[in-house]
Amino acid sequence: MTETDRNDPVTVALELERLRGTLEAGFARADGSLALLVQRSDQTDKQLADHEARLDALERTRWPLASVTALTAGAGFALAFWQAAGR
């Protein structure tokens, strides 16, 4: 390719069109990758919300267990003290 061929408007236009096609393909690939990342982020957010809801449900059902345990232990202590004092 000679210097006159490089400066030919048709050659420049063809090279610019080729460059444009390459850029469009690169942007399409980047857009696809970004869309995939957004989808994975949404799935992660849904999983996190699900885990938070399940953890909240477990915490709500667990708090009476400690209270019941404390009441049972207190009743057992009172019963043991009453039996020991009665003998």
Image: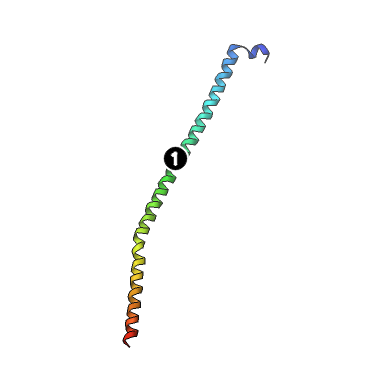
**Residue 59 location, quadrant:** bottom left
Q: Is residue 58 left or right of residue 30?
A: left
- 26 to the left or right of 83: right
Q: Residue furthest right?
A: 2
Q: Badge 1 local density, few (<14 within 10 Å), some, or many (20+)?
A: few
- Quarter of the image for residue 43 reads top left
Residue 6 position within the rendered picture, expressed as x and y whole percent measured from the top left: 64, 14
Q: How many discs appear?
A: 1
Task: Spot the residue most to the front.
Answer: 85
Say which residue appears at 59% left-offset and 12% top-offset: 9
Type of the residue with mark 1: Gln
SS state under label 1: helix
Position of 68 relative to 8 (above/below) = below
> Does 80 appear above or below 50?
below
**Residue nearest the observer in this picture, 72 or 14:** 72
Q: According to the image, what is the colour scheme of the structure?
A: rainbow
Q: At 63% from the left edge and 12% from the top edge, which residue is drawn?
A: 7
Residue holding disc 1: 39
Quarter of the figure with the N terminus:
top right
Residue at the image position 44 percent from the left and 45 percent from the top: 44
27, 78: nearer the viewer? 78
Q: Quadrant of the C terminus?
A: bottom left
User: In the figure, residue 67 lies in which quadrant?
Assistant: bottom left
Q: Is residue 54 above or below residue 6?
A: below
Residue 3 picture location, percent across and down? 67, 13
Q: Nearer the viewer, residue 34 or 72?
A: 72
User: Where does residue 85 sit, x and y in percent of width and height?
Assistant: 33, 85
Residue 72, given in percent of the width and then of the height, sits at: 34, 73
Say which residue appears at 53% left-offset and 29% top-offset.
26
